[in-house]
Image (cartoon, grey):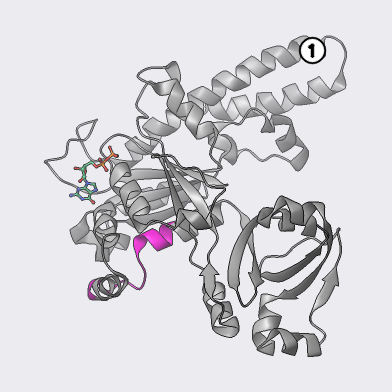
Amino acid sequence: ALKAGIVGLPNVGKSTLFNAITQAGAESANYPFCTIDPNVGIVEVPDERLDKLTELVEPKKTVPTAFEFVDIAGLVRGASKGEGLGNKFLAHIREVDAIVHVVRCFEDENITHVDGKIDPISDIQTINLELVLADLDSVEKRIDRSKKNMKGGNKQYAQEVEVLERIKEALYNDMPVRSVELSDEERLIVRDLHLLTMKPVLYAANVSEDGVTEADTNPYVLKVKEFAEAENAVVVPISAKIEADISEMEEEDKAMFLEELGLSESGLNRLIKAAYRLLGLYTYFTAGVQEVRAWTIRKGTKAPGAAGVIHTDFERGFIRAEVVSYEDLVNAGSMNGAKERGQLRLEGKEYVVQDGDVMHFRFNV
Ligand code: GDP
């Protein structure tokens, strides 16, 4: 399953946020492929299309798609040099598909800040520097190796060195690798380095519970937004404390509480949606009377691969898929309606699944 890692300096609210996530608790029985680990929380992805399909089909059960949040605590200054448990934490970050960087935007004199003052930009830079240094180490090692291989006159290594030198230059200037423009081919060259600063990132600006309604004008949040804009990253203002409180409430109380605060949606929901977008994924649906369900695929996945997300047998025995787009299905009002309009297509092995496709697979067992 795909994973987003929660990172940040100590005392910024990571555990509080992570607790809210696990409290909100997806039913893990629905997601047997997810990891059972105290540091992993499964989150369900809110999707209005799934609600609409449920209205249309009236199934016994509706199951959203899910991904995992991993709590990666313990990242401190000096981690890249192996200080504390530094290297172990960096190794955890290497395994995630996206990073949620929590920054402290709340003041509370009872809760010490590791650097003695609230300064979200400095916090971001502290963490980023560790990630940059770790990447620099990986890149320099690879350059040495490629240069040795290059002596054999192999052109492939010359290209590799050229790309790596460009990346090294950026890292020397404190720029994350995600800011370096790379072609698909170049991306492939560096993929197996699993560079930390190449991963997509979003900043979760943790504001105080009193300031949650004015979060958008909070001066700390504004600073984070300005910083994030320069690197094309998204900022989600959130109050970890409020989310932790909300996650313990019943659905009805939750809605009332949010309304009182003047919020249309919980911060956690916004965070989950933003993180899902960050992962760059597509959602397709299956819609039967037993179950209406959302499934996650990477962009570019073909029909058999999409079937394989449900079960490996579906992929192995794939014959073809009946497909209708979400819009067509909703406009037609029913599967039969879509069929009458000629919008239910039969697609084969080479079909590239689109976001919002509603699919029914035919397969041999
Ligand atoms: P971590 O070290 O980043 O995991 O931080 P924690 O989640 O353990 O939070 C550190 C302390 O800050 C705890 O005492 C939290 O209750 C407190 N805290 C977290 N978020 C907020 C917040 O929005 N407002 C206030 N006042 N305290 C918070």
User: Image height check: is 50 above or below 196?
Assistant: below
Front in this rendered view, residue 279 or 62:
62
Residue 202 in the image: state x and y as whole percent. Answer: 46, 48
* Image: magenta residue range: 260-271
Q: Where is 323 relative to 123, above or below?
A: below
Report the quarter where the C terminus lies. Answer: bottom right
Residue found at the very far left of the displayed protein? 110
**What residue is shown at x 19% (from left), y 32% (from top)?**
116
- Do we see residue 249 in this rendering? yes
Q: Is residue 357 above or below residue 29?
A: below
* Residue 268 on the magenta segment: yes
Q: Give the quadrant of residue 26.
A: bottom left
**Residue 37 coordinates in the image, percent (x, y):** 43, 39
Residue 270, given in percent of the width and then of the height, sits at 42, 62
Helix, strand or loop at mark 1: helix
Residue at screen point 53% across, 39% down = 96
Can see residue 300?
A: no
Residue linked to disc 1: 149
Q: Amino acid at mark 1?
A: Asn
Pick the front one: 181 or 336:
336
Percent x, y for residue 176? 53, 35
| Ligand 1 lies in quarter | top left
